[in-house]
């Protein structure tokens, strides 16, 4: 069976590095634009009655000729292998991702959503409404992911460096940095990290749980 994109998502995540590890960890706004064949208002009739939606999308930047049946999750330090189907690794047999995002509003047939963990221009293959009575399972177990300590970093940044960003971009960037965008097993305090966001290159380092932003520039 062949599948084709029904839409693409557009946002300020221009680089894979620093994209939130899961949906809902950043409130960045994204716009979902339907492909011409599906750009019909009837296709989203009554979708605005739902607060959240599921996105089925493609890891378009991780296409490989082969795949492994085991992966090394960052949450386990990159040292332990688990089955690919027991992980959310982007390297999968069919390169498909699943994310739940908040539907903020619909504008001119386009969906404005928040909380996406998708890179700019990622293809979306299907959209479905989130249904609370069936999709929310209160006593669910999180497996090895429950070991994760959600430790927020303290961010130090010169206000002048943020002048190039809009207020919304600034809030999103600070949220990304507080959540520690480094791979889970990186602890080298001398290392300088860099990633692209909203057309800018952001460089930082982390020491003693404090993230220091070094530069933000084109």
Image: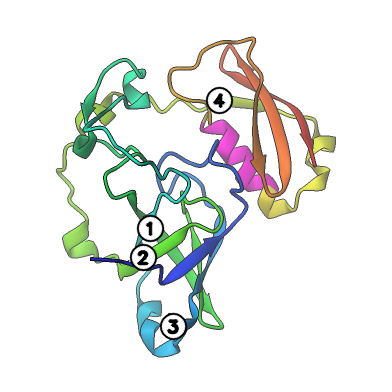
**Residue 153 circle label:** 4
Give the Cα distance between marks 2 and 1.
5 Å
Q: Specify the quadrant that holds the C terminus.
A: top right
User: What element does badge 3 sit on?
Assistant: helix
101 relative to 130 in the view: left or right? right
Q: On the image, numbered disc 2 is attached to which residue? A: 125
Magenta span covers which residues?
170-179
Q: On the image, numbered disc 3 is attached to which residue? A: 37
210 lies above or below 16: above
Give the Cα distance between marks 4 and 2.
35 Å
Proximity of marks 2 and 1: CB atoms separated by less than 8 Å: yes
77 lies above or below 50: above
Give the Cα distance between marks 4 and 1.
30 Å
In the picture as drawn, the residue positioned furthest to the front comes out as: 65
User: What element does badge 1 sit on?
Assistant: strand
Please tell me which residue lies in front, 164 or 62: 62
User: What element does badge 2 sit on?
Assistant: strand
Q: On the image, numbered disc 1 is attached to which residue? A: 57
123 lies above or below 40: above
Q: Which of marks 1 and 3 is nearer the N terminus?
A: 3
Q: Earlier in the sequence, mark 3 or mark 2?
A: 3
For label 4, count other residues whose C-alpha is less than 10 Å away and answer few (under 14), some (14-19) or many (20+): some
For label 1, count other residues whose C-alpha is less than 10 Å away and answer few (under 14), some (14-19) or many (20+): many
For the point 43% across and 49% down, which residue is it? 24
48 relative to 134 in the view: left or right? right
Q: Specify the quadrant that holds the N terminus.
A: bottom left
**Secondary structure mostly seen in the magenta stretch:** helix
49 lies above or below 181: below
Q: Earlier in the sequence, mark 4 or mark 1?
A: 1
For the point 41% across and 58% down, which residue is it? 101
Question: From the viewer's perspective, is the residue at label 4 or at label 2 nearer?
Answer: 2
Q: Which of marks 2 and 1 is nearer the N terminus?
A: 1
């Amino acid at each position: 069976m062949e599948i084709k994109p029904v839409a693409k998502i557009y946002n300020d995540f221009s680089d894979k590095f620093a994209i939130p590890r899961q949906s809902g960890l950043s409130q960045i706004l994204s716009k979902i634009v339907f492909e011409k064949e599906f750009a019909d208002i009837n296709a989203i009739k009554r979708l605005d009655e739902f607060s959240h939606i599921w996105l089925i999308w493609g890891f378009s930047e991780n296409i490989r000729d082969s795949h492994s049946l085991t992966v090394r999750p960052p949450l386990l330090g990159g040292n332990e292998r688990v089955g690919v189907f027991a992980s959310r690794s982007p390297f999968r047999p069919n390169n498909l991702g699943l994310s739940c995002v908040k539907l903020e509003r619909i504008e001119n047939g386009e969906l404005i959503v928040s909380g996406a963990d998708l890179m700019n221009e990622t293809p979306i293959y299907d959209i479905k409404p989130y249904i609370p009575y069936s999709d929310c399972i209160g006593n669910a177990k999180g497996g090895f992911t429950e070991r994760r300590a959600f430790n927020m970093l303290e961010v130090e940044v010169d206000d002048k460096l943020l002048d190039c960003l809009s207020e919304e971009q600034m809030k999103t960037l600070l949220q990304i940095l507080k959540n520690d965008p480094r791979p889970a097993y990186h602890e080298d305090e001398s290392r300088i990290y860099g990633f692209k966001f909203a057309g800018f290159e952001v460089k930082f380092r982390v020491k003693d749980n404090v993230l220091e932003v070094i530069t933000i520039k084109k």
